[in-house]
Amino acid sequence: MSIIEQIEAVLEKGSLDASPESRYVFRTDTTKFMGNPDVVVNVRTENEIAKIVSIASKNGVAVIARGAGTGMSGGAVPIKGGILLNFETMNEIIKIDPKKKLAFVQPGVITDDLRRSAREFGLYYPPDPSSSAVSTIGGNFAENAGGLHCVKYGVTSRYVKGFKFVDSSGIIQKCGVYDEDNTFPGAFVMIGSEGTLGIVTEIALELIDNPPLYDTYITYHDSLLNAIATVIKLKGTAINPAVIELIDKDALKAAVTYTNITLPENTEAVLIIKLDSYFLPELLEKTILIENIFSLMKVREFRKAENEDEERSFWDMRKAVSTSIKKISPDKMNEDICVPLSNMYSFIESTRDISEKYSLKIVVYGHAGDGNLHVNILFDKNNKTESNNARLASEEVFKKTIELGGNISGEHGIGLAKKNFLSLQYSKNEIAFMKKIKKAFDPDNIFNPDKIFNVTKG
Ligand SMILES: Cc1cc2nc3c(=O)[nH]c(=O)nc-3n(C[C@H](O)[C@H](O)[C@H](O)COP(=O)(O)OP(=O)(O)OC[C@H]3O[C@@H](n4cnc5c(N)ncnc54)[C@H](O)[C@@H]3O)c2cc1C
C-alpha cells in the first residue's frame, strides 16, 4: 500500500486531500519559501494524528503541522514534502474553567476567538500577536508568540499550563495539568520548538482577571533619542505600562503618505502607550505619574485618548505602518530582532548606517517596551543588486544585534528564514546541544525537518 492509501485507511472520509489545488495552497506561509506537500490532512482528532505519525515514522516521511500559515520564518513550509497536517479543522475551545482560570483548547483555535471567549467570563488571555485575528494557538505555542501586551504580561510560554502531543512513535503524551503526578518537566521544551519535536493536539492555557480600566496615550518626539529615553524611564517606574509601541520616522513617513494621519511638524518618533488597572485610584495615579514623566522628559506633545474613536485612531496609525510599507516597496525583509533597551538607540542608529551603505530604505517600529523591533529592509526582488544588498544588509542587522547583546528573533522564530544566522548567536556547543534535544524527541527526523538547523537521522 502507498503511504497515501495507508493514511486514508485510518482516517474519516474526506479528511485526506491530495488534490493539486490543496497541495498548492499549503506550499508556503507569509515568507518567500516554497515547499510541496505530498498530501494534506484536515485533522480532526488526536487519535487520527497519532496513527498518521505512526505511519510516517515507519516510512520515514516528514510531518508538518500548520496553523493559519501567518508564520514569518517559513515554519509551516513543507520544504521536504511529506504530510501536512492542517489544524484549521481542529479548532474547538473545549472548555473554559473560570474557577481554575484555565482554557482547554484545540491547536487550531484562532487567538482572538480565545481572547473573546475568555472575556465572556471576565477573564483575559494576554498574548496578542498583531496577527491574532488569524493566527492559531497551536502556531503561537510553536513560535512562543509575543505581542503588544507582552511587555507587561509576558509571552505565550508564560500561560501554557499543560498540553498533549503526539511523539515520534505515534504515542499521545500528556504533561502539566493533563498529568500533574507524572509530568516530565522536560516536555515543556516543546513550547517555541517550531513544530520540530512533536505534534501538539491540545493546550491548557492560564487566564487572568481582565483588567477593566485603561488609558491610552500617544506621544510625539523631536528625536528618536528622546522617544527611547522616555521608554527607558517608563520601564524603571511602577507604572508598568501594558503596551509601549515605537514608530520611527521612516515608518511614520510611510504611514502619513498613504493615510489621512497627520502629525505635528518635525515629529521624529511616536510612542503609543497603554496603561491598565483593576482599580480606578491606581489608574488615576498612573496617569498623573506618566504625565509628569512626559514633562520631565520634555516630550514635545502628548495626547490621552478621550474616547474609543480617538484610541482607535492611535492603533490605526500603528497598523497603517505595515500596510503603507507594502505600498512603498514591492518587497521587504521583516526581521524581528530584540536588543536590550539600553542599546536600542545605538541599534536603530546603526540601521541608518546600514541603510546608507546599501542604498536601501530600512524602516523600524515595534514592541519597544521589550526591545523587540521590526526592522523592515525594503527592496525589489527583480532588481539583482537590491536583492543582494538586502541580503547583506540583513546579515549586518543580525551581526549588530548580537554585538549589542541582542537576539536574532524576538518572536517570529528561526524556521528557514534565520537558520543560516543561528551560529551568529549560538556557539557550536550550544547548537550541538539543541540538536541532541531534537534527536532525543525525534530520532528519525520526521517532524518539520530542515527547520532551525539540519540534523542527520539516528
Ligand atoms: C501581520 C502579521 C503580524 C504578526 N505579528 C506578530 C506578533 O506581533 N508577534 C508574534 O509573535 N508573531 C507575529 N506574527 C507571526 C505569526 O503570526 C506568529 O508566529 C504565529 O504564532 C503563527 O501562528 P500560525 O497559526 O499562523 O502558525 P503557522 O504559520 O501555521 O505555523 C507556525 C509554526 O507552528 C507550527 N505549528 C502549528 N501548529 C502546530 C501544532 N499543532 N503542533 C506543532 N507545531 C505546530 C508549524 O509547524 C510552524 O512551525 C505576525 C504575522 C503577521 C502576518
Image (spheres, rainbow, N blue to C red):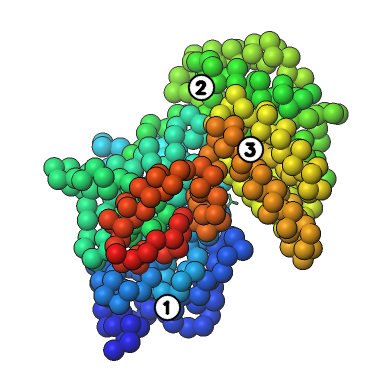
Residue at horizontal 40%, vertical 44%?
430
Screen quadrant of the C terminus: bottom left
Q: Residue furthest front?
A: 428
In the depicted structure, whether residue 23 falls above or below residue 156? below
> Residue 386: x and y, percent?
77, 57
Q: Is residue 296 visible?
A: yes
For marks 1 and 3, the one nearer the N-term is 1
Q: Amino acid at mark 2?
A: Asn
Amino acid type, residue under disc 3 in the picture: Lys
Could you tell which of marks 3 and 2 lies nearer the N-terminus? 2
User: Does the residue tagged 1 have its C-beta within 8 Å of any atom of ligand 1?
Assistant: no
**Residue corresponding to mark 2:** 240
Label 1 secondary element: strand
Image-based side of 252 in relation to 191, left or right: right
- Quadrant for the N terminus in the image: bottom left
Amino acid type, label 1: Val
Cα–Cα gap, marks 1 and 3: 41 Å
Residue 445 is situated, as x and y percent measured from the top left of the image, at 35, 65
Mark nearer the viewer, 3 or 2: 3
Q: Residue at x 73, y 58 (%)?
A: 388
Camera-side residue: 354 or 376? 354
Q: Is the C-beta separation of discs 3 and 2 under 8 Å?
A: no
What residue sits right under mark 1 in the picture? 39
Q: Report the residue that reaches farthest toward the right.
A: 265
The reply to whether the C-beta atoms of the residues labelled 1 and 3 are less than 8 Å apart is: no
**Residue depth check, mark 1 versus mark 3: number of the one nearer the observer:** 3
Q: Secondary structure at mark 3?
A: helix
Q: What residue would you read off at disc 3?
A: 400
Q: Secondary structure at mark 2?
A: loop
